[in-house]
Image (cartoon, helix red, strand yellow):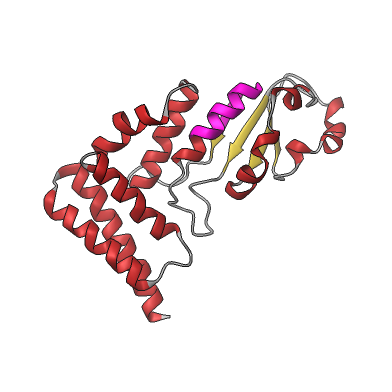
Amino acid sequence: MALKDDGEIFDLDAQKPLADLPDDVAYQYCVNRAFWYDRRDELTAEHVARLPHRTNVLRTHAGSQWNRQRHAWAPEMFADMATRSGAAGMRVLTIFAEPSAYHPTNEINYLAYARFTWDPNRSGESFWQDEVAPRFGGEAEAAAFQAGVRVLDDPAATASALTRVRGEALDQVAATSGEVQRRWLWLAERTARFAHSLQQG
């Protein structure tokens, strides 16, 4: 059973009609990206214990929503959700995961989801060093990719800012090969597409 409203997990009055429903099913609460950062401190073990049923699932559409977040960078959010929901006693964290892992942003999101749901106590530093940095050519390169994606995710980004990121990505395309190169080529193409749209508009 899914409760799709972002506020319902924190509205105990809204939970009252669920009390008469079976306890041997999962009750799913969906949260979006903005809502999570506004309300995450309320997800405590004390609050989860007051929900009507035992098997409670947290679900998010972050990193795959259509409102320019289809390929948004969200590994920090997935790590945070895994850590907090586990500590609060939520049984499961799920994600929509609609886009292919071909897209490097989604690839990193899914890796964060997999690693931090398996081990919520894992450090962000070890995840970055072991999983992220090698996929972009090193730690400095991964940080540059992340910075470029932040521009791509920013709805206020200008065509000139996107074009600058495209140039930096193409420099990495020329300096790399294989899967690392493919990831940088993706960033170059995406920023070129967004810049073109702004220039045409």
Q: Residue at 61% across / 50% down in the picture?
A: 34
Magenta stretch: residue 61 in it?
A: no
From the top left corner, tell me how far across and down residue 157 is, in percent.
42, 67
From the top left corner, tell me how far across and down residue 39 is, in percent.
68, 41
195 up-or-down from 103: above or below = below
* 192 lies left or right of 124: left
40 up-or-down from 104: above or below = above
Q: Residue at 53% across / 41% down in the picture?
A: 96
Q: Residue at 38% across / 46% down in the picture?
A: 105
* Count of residue discs: 0
Magenta stretch: residue 86 in it?
A: yes
**Does residue 189 appear anywhere in the picture?**
yes
Closer to the camera in the image, 200 or 1: 200
49 up-or-down from 65: above or below = above
136 up-or-down from 131: above or below = below
Q: Residue furthest bottom?
A: 200
In the picture, the quarter occupied by the C terminus is bottom left
Q: Quadrant of residue 61?
A: top right
From the top left corner, tell me how far across and down residue 69 is, in percent.
49, 54
**Does residue 90 appear anywhere in the picture?**
no
* 168 lies left or right of 46: left
Magenta residues, dominant SS class: helix
From the top left corner, tell me how far across and down residue 194 is, in percent.
37, 67
In the picture, the quarter occupied by the N terminus is top right
Q: Residue at 59% across / 29% down in the picture?
A: 84
* 4 lies left or right of 187: right
Part of the protein shown in magenta:
79-93
